[in-house]
């Protein structure tokens, strides 16, 4: 599945993020069941037997971290991203968590990656921090308190 193009990502993402760019690349980091080797869990959205999106998350000590969310280009804007986020939040709540975290990036010009507005719409708050990376882009952390 393809949710974004390489050229779109220039300035916003590190090469290692490409593990999420194709099923083949993802297979290389897969562990057991729905878990990746580093303990992250993956939930997919299917339509007519086809994977049209996935969300990657990890239950940390005091919060649940959403590491990645991708909806295939032709299915974006149809509520699938919202549904996957809501699903992971409901798992988090049922496990007793009250705090969610995620992040996106901004490029060297301070322009945020295009999902910024999606996260704020989902109730995630920009913490105001801009964390340097070894690349040109900075990380923008978001938090959300679950009620
Ligand atoms: C960002 C992404 C995950 C959103 O998922 P989606 O299924 O397209 O979004 P939804 O249809 O569930 O949208 C939910 C709401 O967010 C809004 N929204 C979606 N994308 C948005 C964006 N880029 N900016 C602002 N608002 C956005 C929608 O308009 C909708 O609002 P509404 O309910 O008022 O109509 C998806 O577009 C995607 O995979 N993009 C490329 C990969 C990516 O950026 N992933 C996030 C990594 S940080």
Image: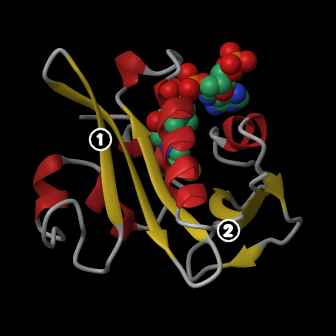
Left or right of 35, for residue 16: right
The spot of residue 79 in percent (x, y) is 53, 20
Q: Residue at (71%, 62%) from the top-left corner?
A: 108
Q: Residue at (45%, 70%) from the top-left corner?
A: 58
Which label number is shown at residue 44? 1
Determine the image quadrant of residue 143. bottom right
Front-lying residue, 124 or 7: 124
Taking 119 as reference, is 27 above or below it? below
Taking 19 as reference, is 116 above or below it? above
Whole-number angstrom distance, CA of label 1 to CA of label 2? 25 Å
Which label number is shown at residue 93? none
Q: Are marks 1 and 2 in contact (CB under 8 Å)?
A: no
Determine the image quadrant of residue 130. bottom right
Tell me the residue that label 2 is attached to.
139
Front-lying residue, 99 or 101: 99
Lower position in the chain sequence, tag 1 or tag 2: 1
Q: Say whether residue 4 is visible.
A: no
State which image quarter holds ligand 1. Answer: top right
Q: What color scheme is it?
A: secondary structure
Q: Residue at (83%, 57%) from the top-left corner?
A: 126
Please count the marks in the image: 2
The spot of residue 144 in percent (x, y) is 76, 56
Left or right of 32, for residue 3: right
Q: Residue at (57%, 31%) from the top-left corner?
A: 82
Dot 2: within a 10 Å radius of its alpha carbon, few (fewer than 14), some, or many (20 or more) residues?
some
Left or right of 15, for residue 103: right
């Amino acid at each position: 599945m393809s949710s974004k193009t390489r050229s779109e990502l220039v300035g916003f993402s590190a090469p290692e993020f490409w593990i999420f760019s194709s099923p083949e690349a993802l297979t290389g980091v897969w562990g057991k069941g729905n878990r990746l080797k580093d303990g992250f869990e993956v939930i997919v959205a299917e339509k007519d037997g086809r994977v049209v999106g996935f969300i990657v998350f990890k239950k940390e000590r005091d919060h649940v971290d959403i590491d990645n969310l991708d909806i295939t280009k032709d299915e974006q804007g149809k509520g699938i991203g919202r549904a996957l986020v809501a699903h992971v939040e409901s798992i988090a709540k049922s496990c007793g968590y009250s705090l969610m975290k995620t992040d996106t990036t901004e490029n060297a010009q301070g322009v945020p990656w295009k999902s910024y507005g999606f996260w704020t719409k989902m109730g995630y708050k920009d913490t105001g921090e801009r964390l340097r990376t070894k690349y040109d882009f900075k990380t923008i952390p978001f938090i959300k308190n679950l009620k």
